[in-house]
Structures are given as C-alpha cells and as structure tokens.
Amino acid sequence: MVGAGKTTIEQTTLRLVAKAGEKGILQSKLCKKIAVDSRRVSQIMARLESKRMIKREREMHNGRWTYRVVAEIKPPEFRNPKVGSLIGVPCASCKEDDKCSTTGIITPEKCDSLTRWLMKLAAAA
C-alpha cells in the first residue's frame, strides 16, 4: 500500500483497538470491521506491535486460534481531546518504518520527524 492508504488503515486499526479499551478486540473481528483480509491485518498488527503501540495475546476463539489485541498507547483523541488525532503522526507513513523499533537502526527516541511532530503538538496544547 502506498503512503496515505497505509496511514489511513493503520490509524483506523489503532483507533478501533483503542476504542475496545482494556479488554481489547479479537484480531479476527478487526478483519471484519475494517474489511481487510486476515493476512493484511496480521501485517498491520505486526507493524503496530513492533512500534509498541499494541500488544497481542494468543487466544482460542470458537475452536480457532486468533489474537486478542490491546492498545499499549492510546491515540491522543482518547487521552486528551485538545491534542487532536494521529492523522499527522509521521510514523504511520514513514518509509523507514520497517527499520524502526526500540532496538532497530532507527528508534522513536532518535527520530527527528517524530520529535518535530511531538513538539508541534506540545506547542499547540
């Protein structure tokens, strides 16, 4: 998927997971809610999990294995309505996201794009 499409689907997915609260949502249910095949949802979940935005726990549901997905971080609109949304977060459309993790070549702590975006949010709040 290219830039904006990827951004939209990941943001939508993260919002649905966050909206599910502490109980989380089954990954198999996410496929239906966002109308995307299970393979693509698995890829999205793996990317969000590597960024520590979600966590997944394996669970048996109706005789099949799936994952229960819980948000590790809440999008700003779920924490503080004044902050806004994740629409502008650079991570969602970053071309280097496959190299980014807490132990990767690129880390969120050292990312200039993410730092600039966070500083802009802080200044606007």
Image: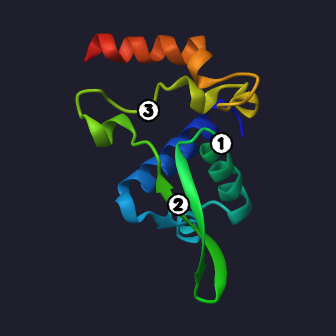
**Mark closer to the chain start, 2 or 3:** 2
Q: Residue at x 65, y 57 (%)?
A: 41
Q: Are marks 1 and 3 in contact (CB under 8 Å)?
A: no
The residue identified by callout 3 is 86
The residue positioned 62% from the left and 29% from the top of the image is 93
Amino acid at circle 3 = Leu
Report the amino acid beneath label 2. Answer: Val
Query: Residue, x 58% and y 88% (percent of image)?
Result: 62
Q: CA distance from mark 1 to mark 2?
A: 13 Å
Q: Residues within 10 Å of mark 1 (few under 14, many from 20)?
A: some
Q: Quadrant of residue 31?
A: bottom right
State the image quarter where residue 19 is shown: bottom left
Residue denoted by label 2? 69
> How far is mark 1 from mark 3, CA to CA?
18 Å
CA distance for labels 2 and 3 = 19 Å
Q: Circle 3 sits in a helix, a strand or a loop, which is it?
A: loop
Residue 8 at x, y percent in the picture: 54, 40
Image spot of residue 6 (x, y percent): 63, 39
Sequence-earlier tag: 1 or 2:
1
- Return the mark for residue 50: 1
As helix, strand or loop, the secondary structure at mark 1 comes to helix
- Residue 71 located left or right of residue 125: right
Image quarter in which the C terminus is found: top left
Vertical position of residue 73 compared to residue 33: above or below: above
Find residue 76 and report its horizontal and vertical position in percent: 35, 35
